[in-house]
Image (spheres, grey):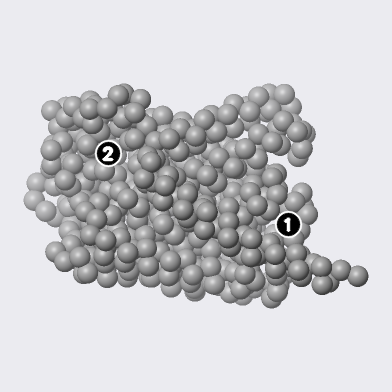
Amino acid sequence: MHVTGTVPPPAPEPRETPAAPDHTTPADPAPGNGRHARRFGLPVATALVMGNIIGGGIFLLPASVAPFGTISLLAFGVLTVGAIALALVFGRLAARDPRTGGPYVYARGAFGDFAGFLWAYWITTWVSNAALAVAAVGYLDVLIPVNDHRWTACLAALVVQWLPALANFAGTRWVGAVQLVSTVLKFAPLLLVAVGGLFFFDADNLGPFNASGSGGIGAVSAAAAILLFSYLGVESAAVSAGEVEDPRRTVGRATVIGTAGAALVYLLGTLSVFGTVAHDRLVTSDAPFSDAVNAMFGGAWGGWTVALAALVSMTGCLNGWTLLSAQTPYAAARDGLFPAAFARKRRGVPTTGVGVTVVLASLLTVYNYTSGSAKVFEVLVLVTTFTATVPYLLATAAQIFHLVSGQGEKVDRARLVRDGIAASVAAAFSLWLVAGAGYAAVYQGVLFLFAGVLVYAVMAARRRRAETSNAP
């Protein structure tokens, strides 16, 4: 793992939930004591962003959007513009407030406890973990037949989720090492298909432009709602800002570099898969990148190689997302909005958050397999899409709030204009994706959010009672 500079010994983590800090005071403790806890430099922070973005999505989503036709490539382009705008917004917000928690910290700082608590981002992390595990099973099936029986596939998905959780329990040093290695290894098959596939490109494989039969804008929105899953993670460095060295500078750079690099790989990779695998074969594929390599070189060896690399990629992605899944409740617990146990760290990792979220993701995985849905991945992706847009929209609103109110560091007029354009594009992008997620996903996502209102009521009441009893 790469560590830059010299980091002074961090302060010990508090054992009890502290009083809520002032919203304008950016302070976050160091990640913890011991040789297993390390701060992330720019290479690891960038790898965290790229590793979390380029995870299971790119390896399965070409097949998921194939039913929409090649119009989904247009959706990818629009989505990339929105993702870059979000990256710029998160970079600026992290420079203003470099604490662990990301969207939670930004929403709470601008709009108060309730907006910060809305646990949509936490839901996003563990629902997306379940979706990634399901995607990984599709590639595992290329190597070992596991999809022949529903329970075998379910067990495999659970194993894929728990292995990265064990790396997290070992500490941030292992999280960073796994993230860096898996990010490097995943690029071999991605570049093979993204670049090599262009030499085997056959326009006859593309299929119809708009295969869904709906209007152009509706088809682009629907395809983008599914494709958003492949861009989740743009906020990764911001969420883990407390574990990043020099976060005011590093988070923004890592976010933009990681997002731009992922976007380039995505666009080339999806185009190559569309051009090398026949459309009617692609819409039913469980491992489209393996099918693309087999179509390019013949035989099955290429498909096996890509499947193995995809598993490494998804495991690395789950490694990073498991850490992120614990960071938001950690930040909320330090503010008294989550149980105090979530605020405790071991070897730099909020282990309670890791344990709880991996259990929730496992339960969701089991539920979706037992429900008999033929499209478990797509169902989980759409729910994740909606829950992700809520914190994205709140974070963007926080940036607009700071720009309009004039709070934060002074900037020149050119910087103000650039930040305003990025925030406006990110806000429009987030609202568009809420509409594109579809009624069913919004319905399920709102149920998750409303359940959080009840939890907030209990935690806020407990904190108020504690403040009253401690008052002189």
Residue 353 in view: yes
Residue 346 or residue 5, whichever sits in front: 346
Residue 355 locus on image (x, y percent): 48, 72
Q: How far from the left and from the top, in percent, is residue 35?
A: 58, 74
Residue in the picture at 82% in, 72% down = 469
Q: In the rendered image of this protein, does residue 155 appear above or below residue 424?
A: below
- Place of residue 213 in the rendered image (x, y in percent of width and height, measured from the top left): 22, 27
Q: Residue at x 38, y 41 (%)?
A: 439
Say which amino acid is labelled 2: Val
Q: Is residue 67 left or right of residue 451?
A: left
Height in image: 412 above or below 143? Answer: above
For image coordinates 26% across by 43% down, the residue present is 64
Q: CA distance from mark 1 to mark 2?
A: 42 Å
- Element marked by disc 1: loop
Q: Is residue 143 visible?
A: no
Choose between 282 and 379: the one closer to the eye: 379
Which residue carries the number 2 mark?
65
Where in the figure is residue 39, as x and y percent of width and height?
A: 60, 61
Left or right for 414, reference 225: right
From the image, tell me which residue sits under label 1: 27
